[in-house]
Amino acid sequence: MSGTQQAKGGLPQEKLTTIQVAVIISNFMLGSGILSLPRVSAEKVGTPDAWISVLLGGLVAIVAGVIMALLSQAYPGQTFYEYSRKIVGSWLGHLLGPVMILYFAATAAFQVRSLFEVSGFILLEGTPQWAITSVFLWVGLYLMLGGLGAIARLFELILPLTIFIYLLVTLMGFTIFDLDNLRPLLGQGIWPVLKGVQTTSLAFTGFEVIILLTAYMKNPNKNIKAVTAGIAIPLVIYIVTVFMVIGALSVDGTLTKNWPTLDMARSFELSGLIFERFEFLLLIIWIMQIFSSFTTAFYFSALGISQLYKRKMKTCLYGLLPFVYIFVAVPRKLDDVFTLGDWIGKVALYLFGVIPIVLLIVTKWRSSKHANQT
């Protein structure tokens, strides 16, 4: 294959374009949040202004993404697993690495478990958990064995289809949309909106892969553009989602649904078309996004094991599979799944919101110190 090299771990490895990196980030972010974000944000804000919290949360994510992109630019050709040890030393670097590996593994398991909960509720009621998750895991593994190039090319097909179908189905919700459900604007002031920013920011976790993807970019200096575009696409989709769901179901109606976006799509019918009910179209593209989020998280968890412990990438992918499968089964009920998602989001807040700032400051300080000495 032209432009393809053999990676250290034995997998084919291609340099990624700026667009491909942006697409990977967008696909990783558009996971289970599509269906649950309206409920989560409305629960925290408590007013129809939850969409404003989503907007502010997205802007916070863009700032954090730019910081991480700048950090990665200082260490060209290296992933966070490799250069973190150079910044904070071997001991702390080996501590950060396993935490990050565990984070991505837990994220992968959470996405698979979310898939089981929703598909079991809507499509495959009564189907055993192992039957759904096993197929999902093995298909994902098959894709990952093709390397990042194969993942990026598939995601380039998935994202445009997702945007088109999702916005089409969501905007059809105007048939049951009531603008009064979104009034009054800032009726209780700005404070409830600000309270919801932290919660909505967690929905944008996924941009952190820029600290790993930069090492595989053709033009690593364009990683800021890639991460900004990668966050902007989910930001628009999430704002439209929260705005439409609350406008259609009201705040109180949204709070009573586990998956309010899906419930909104089930609340209207358009007669005379090939499809009169559209929740299944929404579910199809959601499953594709869950698959994207799962494969990205799983791949970068295995990459961490490969780079930290000097093992072949293919071995790490196969070896991680049973552990993720076991992790999928840990939550016993749906509330436990939501709790796991909250836990993952809070870990991401500190792991990728605070630590990169500290590491960037240390990097800039060392660079300026070295420049002064020379």
Image: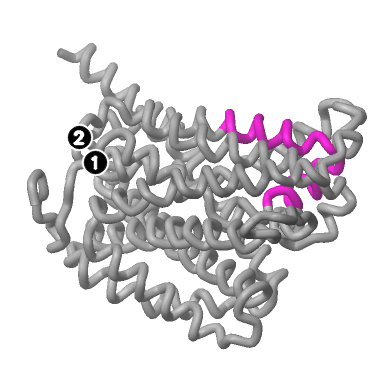
In the displayed structure image, the side of residue 372 where residue 298 appears, left or right: right
- For image coordinates 34% across by 22% down, the residue present is 365
Give the camera-side residue of 157 and 255: 157
In the displayed structure image, the side of residue 212 where residue 230 appears, left or right: right
Residue 222 in percent (x, y) is at 30, 26
**Mark 1 = which residue?**
16
What's the image's color scheme?
Answer: one colour
Q: Main secondary structure of the magenta part?
A: helix
The amino acid beneath tag 1 is Leu
- For image coordinates 59% across by 59% down, the residue present is 281
Q: Is residue 251 magenta?
A: no
Quadrant including the C terminus: top left
Is tag 2's residue or tag 1's residue first in the polypeptide sequence? 1
The amino acid beneath tag 2 is Lys
Residue 81 in percent (x, y) is at 30, 50
Q: Is residue 330 above or below residue 196?
A: below
Q: Is residue 302 above or below residue 93?
A: below
The residue stretch that appears in magenta: 37-60
Residue 308 in percent (x, y) is at 25, 58
Under circle 2, the secondary element is loop
Residue 314 occupies quadrant: bottom left
Contact between labelled residues 1 and 2, with CB atoms less than 8 Å apart: yes
In the displayed structure image, the side of residue 1 where residue 41 appears, left or right: right
**Mark 2 = which residue?**
218
Residue 18 in percent (x, y) is at 30, 33
Under circle 1, the secondary element is loop
